[in-house]
Amino acid sequence: MRLWPKSELFNNALWKIQTVNQQRLPLLQQFILFTGVGFLSAVGHYGMLIGLVQLFDVGAVLASTAGALLGAWINYGLNRQYTFQSRASLTTAVPRFVLVAGGGVALNALFMWIGVDVLHLYYLYSQFASTGLILLWSFYLHKFWTFRHPPANE
C-alpha cells in the first residue's frame, strides 16, 4: 500500500533530496533526528510543566525549569546514541552536555520569565517560543562540541 501518490512532482522532489551535497545530507539527517529526539524530550518537558501548573499550582517558571531538566535527561541518552552516534568519551561528553543543558535550562527560565512575567504572555506561548530558540542553539553546540567525534590523534 502506497502512503503517497506516484507523481512526477514527488519523483522530482525525491531526486532533489537524493542529490543533496553529501556533506549537507548528514547534517540535515542529524537535525531531523535531533528534532525528533527534541519532540520526545518536549513531551516529557511539557507533560511535567502542564502537570505541575495544572495539578499542583506550581508557578510556570519553576514548573518549566523542572520540565526542562527532565527533557535534558531524555535528550542526552537518545542524542548520544542515535542522532550523533558519538564516540566521544563519557568523561568528555557528559560534562559538556551538562554545561549545554544547564545553559538551555537557564535560557529557558530567562525566556519564560520575559514571556510570562514581563510580556504577560500565556505560559504555553512563551514555552513554544523558548523551545524553538533553544532547539537551534543546542543543536549547534551538541553537534560541534558535546558529541563531536575526536580526531584520530586524540
Image (tube, helix red, strand yellow):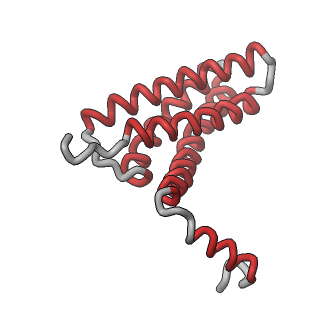
The answer to whether residue 60 is visible is: no
The answer to whether residue 19 is visible is: yes
Give the image quarter of residue 92: top left
**Percent from the top left, x then y, of residue 72?**
47, 35
Which residue is rendered at x = 36% and y = 30% of the image? 96
**Percent from the top left, x then y, of residue 110?**
62, 18
> Where 5 sits versus 28, above or below?
below
Q: Is residue 46 left or right of residue 24?
A: right
**Percent from the top left, x then y, of residue 116?**
74, 20
Which residue is rendered at x = 66% and y = 22% of the image? 111
> Where 147 sits versus 33, above or below?
above
Which residue is rendered at x = 74% and y = 27% of the image? 123
Which residue is rendered at x = 52% and y = 56% of the image? 24
The quadrant of the rendering that contains the N terminus is: bottom right
> Where 28 sits versus 102, above or below?
below
Most distant residue in the front direction: 21
- Count of picture labels: 0
> Where 57 sits versus 77, above or below?
above
The quadrant of the rendering that contains the C terminus is: top left
